[in-house]
Image: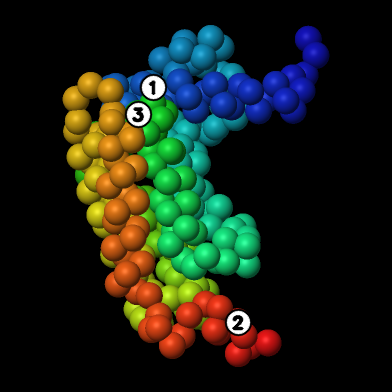
Amino acid sequence: MARPTKEEARDTRRLILDAALDLFSEGGFAGTSMRQIARAVGVRESALYHHFPSKAAIFEALLAEMGPGRSEHLESLDLDAMLREGPEPLLRSIARFMIEGWATPHEQKFVRMLMAEGPRLKDAGQVHSSVMASRGRLGGLFAELARRGAIRPGDFELYAIEFMGPMLMMRLMYLVLAGGTPDVERLLERVDAHVHHFCESVKVGEAMTVKSVSRRRS
C-alpha cells in the first residue's frame, strides 16, 4: 500500500480535529474515547496515533488552533494603510473579524467544549496561557498605535481588557446563551457602538492627531 501523501495527511488531521471537537463538545473530554474519534473519522484507532500521540494532544491542538492562534492576524495588519482615517476603522475591523469567527458553528462547539472542561483546563493552565497570549498581542497593538500617535499612551494591558471585556460579554449574551439562530447583525451593531465608545476614551487630544503626528515626524 502506498504511503499517504502530505496533502492526505493534512486532510486526515483536519478530519480528526473536527470529529474530536464534535465529540468533546457533546460528551466532554473524559466522555470521549480515541475509539469514538476514530469511528467518527472512519479510520482505525491506530491511525490516529500517526497524527497525535494521545487524546490530550488532540485537545491541545484544538486549543492552539482556536485560542491564541486566532490573534496572530494582529501581527500582519497593514497599519499604515488602515490608520489613514484614524484608529476606529482599524479597531472596528478587528472586532468584526472576531465576531465573524465567533458566530460560526465550529466556534460554538469550541465554546461548549471550553465550558464543559473549564475546571480541568484551569488546573492545567491551558486557558490562562491562551488568554495571556491573545492579550499580549492586543496590548502590543495598542502600544504600537500609541507610538504612532493614533491613541494616547496608557496602560496597554488595561486597554486590551477594556476592549475585549464587553465583546466577550456580548459574545456570551448573543452567541452562547441566546436561543435559536444568533442575531449576528444585532451583535455587530452593538460591537460597532462599543468600538466607537472605546476609541472616544483613548483618543489623542485635538492638538495631537494622527495626521499632525505624521507631519511632525516628516
Q: Is residue 199 left or right of residue 174?
A: right
Q: Position of residue 156 (x, y in %)?
A: 38, 74
| Residue 126 in sight | yes
Identify whether 73 is placed above or below 2. Answer: below
Mark toward the viewer: 1 or 2: 2
**Mark 2 or mark 3, which is nearer the start of the sequence?**
3
Mark toward the viewer: 3 or 2: 2
Label 3, label 2: how many angstroms apart (C-alpha)?
45 Å
Determine the image quadrant of residue 182: top left
Residue in front for this viewpoint, 201 or 66: 201
Residue drawn at point x = 38 percent, y = 38 percent: 102
Residue drawn at point x = 34 percent, y = 42 percent: 188
Quarter of the figure with the N terminus = top right
To which residue does mark 1 refer? 22
To which residue does mark 3 refer? 109
Identify the mark at residue 94; answer none if there is no mark: none
Label 1, label 2: how many angstroms apart (C-alpha)?
50 Å
Label 3, label 1: how many angstroms apart (C-alpha)?
7 Å
Residue drawn at point x = 47 percent, y = 51 percent: 93
Residue in front for this viewpoint, 204 or 181: 204
Q: Secondary structure at mark 3?
A: helix
- Asked if the residues shown at circle 3 and circle 1 are in contact, with their CB atoms under 8 angstroms apart, the answer is yes
Residue drawn at point x = 25 percent, y = 54 percent: 166
Residue type indicated by callout 1: Asp
Residue type indicated by callout 2: Ser
Q: Position of residue 95 (x, y in %)?
A: 41, 51
Q: Position of residue 26 (x, y in %)?
A: 29, 22
Mark toward the viewer: 3 or 1: 3
